[in-house]
Image (spheres, grey):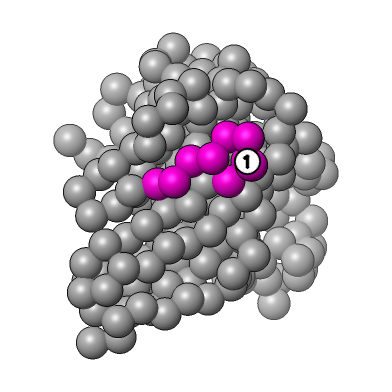
Amino acid sequence: DAGVTQSPTHLIKTRGQQVTLRCSPKSGHDTVSWYQQALGQGPQFIFQYYEEEERQRGNFPDRFSGHQFPNYSSELNVNALLLGDSALYLCASTQYRGGGNQPQHFGDGTRLSIL
Amino acid sequence: AQTVTQSQPEMSVQEAETVTLSCTYDTSESDYYLFWYKQPPSRQMILVIRQEAYKQQNATENRFSVNFQKAAKSFSLKISDSQLGDAAMYFCAYRAFYTGANSKLTFGKGITLSVRP
């Protein structure tokens, strides 16, 4: 049973560039959430996708956008990269109509470094 | 908005001893979920234990247990018989009840736990 998979593992970009991160949810899950984790901090919620629509959004600028595909996989896009976007980006999946106490399952993350 | 506070940035424990990690939160809701996640250097966030706010009984998972004080909005994690593999960053997290599994998680800043052999 494959868990949540993310690619790439590590990425280096320069300021002003654009980046796309990818996530495949755990088998049986239909909802994907993205989190940004700065070094030494807790993860911050970016947004969540279900049925190919953004369902919830955290306090992040429009430079952060996403997409969900019919197979439930998801992409996170960040435009006009800033130094402050350097972080670990975590993807988490769950079942939209699952029991309220079921946890979100996390991937290993993508480490994004901005030079 | 809900907030989660972990005021201890680092803690250390001797192998086989017991350690307690503290967490407080703020919410106006009466029903919600609380979680402790572990993040080792491998980066993957691993669920340690969960607690439903409407349950009075404290959750227990093997060597891990919580002390949930709803009135005080406190949710501490106790690790008994600490092992070297317990060394990691631990995050306390809150999730609203009304939207169920699809609610976002709100995390604290985390506590780095080291285990001395």
Front-lying residue, A49 or A69? A49
Q: Chain of mark 1?
A: B
Q: Quadrant of residue B106?
A: top right
Question: Which residue corresponds to mark 1?
Answer: B73
Q: Position of residue B25 (x, y in %)?
A: 65, 44
What residue is rendered at 42% in x and 80% in y? B12
Q: Position of residue B48 (x, y in %)?
A: 34, 48
Q: Which residues are magenta?
A: B66-74
Q: Position of residue B8 (x, y in %)?
A: 59, 69
Does B95 appear above or below B8?
above
Question: Dot 1: few (<14), some (14–19), or many (≥20) neighbours within 10 Å?
Answer: few
Amino acid carrying label 1: it is Lys
Q: Is residue A102 left or right of residue B99?
A: left
Quick one: quadrant of the N terminus of chain B?
Answer: top right
Does A43 appear above or below A111?
above
State how many labels appear. 1
In the rendered image, residue B13 lying in the magenta stretch gets the answer no
What residue is rendered at 53% in x and 76% in y? B10
Q: Is residue A66 among what the camera can see?
A: no
